[in-house]
Image (tube, helix red, strand yellow):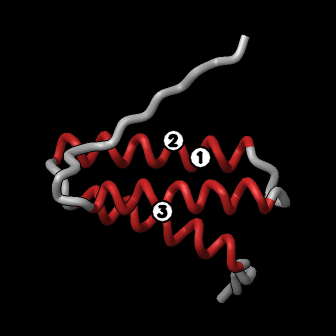
Amino acid sequence: MASRPKLSGLQKQVLSLYRGFLRAARSKGPEERQRIESIVSAEFHQNSKNIDRKNFLQIEYLLRRGKKQLDQLKSPDTVGLSSFRFSQQ
């Protein structure tokens, strides 16, 4: 059995946040659940590509922001999640 490398504390927090979003999505309607999962997956994937693994300040900032968004999503009053992109020209 191959052993996996140990995860750092930040890596564990990121994975925990990702799982938290997926769990929160389950409490929404099927169409909204799929939309939330798509947005969350795209956001985490984009951040994994665009952020240097050693940029701890930015990673910690995104973790704090993500936790706030997750708390909002968990609220029964929240029906969905939205995302927007802007480009700098």
The location of residue 42, given as percent across then percent down, is: 51, 41
Q: Residues within 10 Å of mark 2 (few under 14, many from 20)?
A: few
Q: Residues within 10 Å of mark 3 (few under 14, many from 20)?
A: some
Name the amino acid, label 2: Ala
- Residue 67's disc number: 3
* Among the 4 quarters of the image, the one containing residue 70: bottom left
- Circle nearer the N terminus (2, 3): 2
Q: Which residue is mark 2?
A: 42
Note whether 50 is above or below 1 in the view shown.
Answer: above
Q: Secondary structure at mark 3?
A: helix
The location of residue 64, given as percent across then percent down, is: 57, 61
- Circle nearer the N terminus (1, 3): 1
Residue at far right of view: 54
Q: How many marks?
A: 3
Q: Between residues 3 and 54, which one lies in front from this camera angle? A: 54
Instruction: Measure how far apart labels 2 and 1 are at the Cα level.
Output: 5 Å
Whether label 1 touches label 3, CB < 8 Å: no
* Among the 4 quarters of the image, the one containing residue 5: bottom right
Q: Residues within 10 Å of mark 1 (few under 14, many from 20)?
A: few
Instruction: Measure how far apart labels 1 and 3 are at the Cα level.
Output: 17 Å
The location of residue 29, given as percent across then percent down, is: 14, 49
State the residue at coordinates (42%, 41%).
39
State the residue at coordinates (81%, 51%).
52
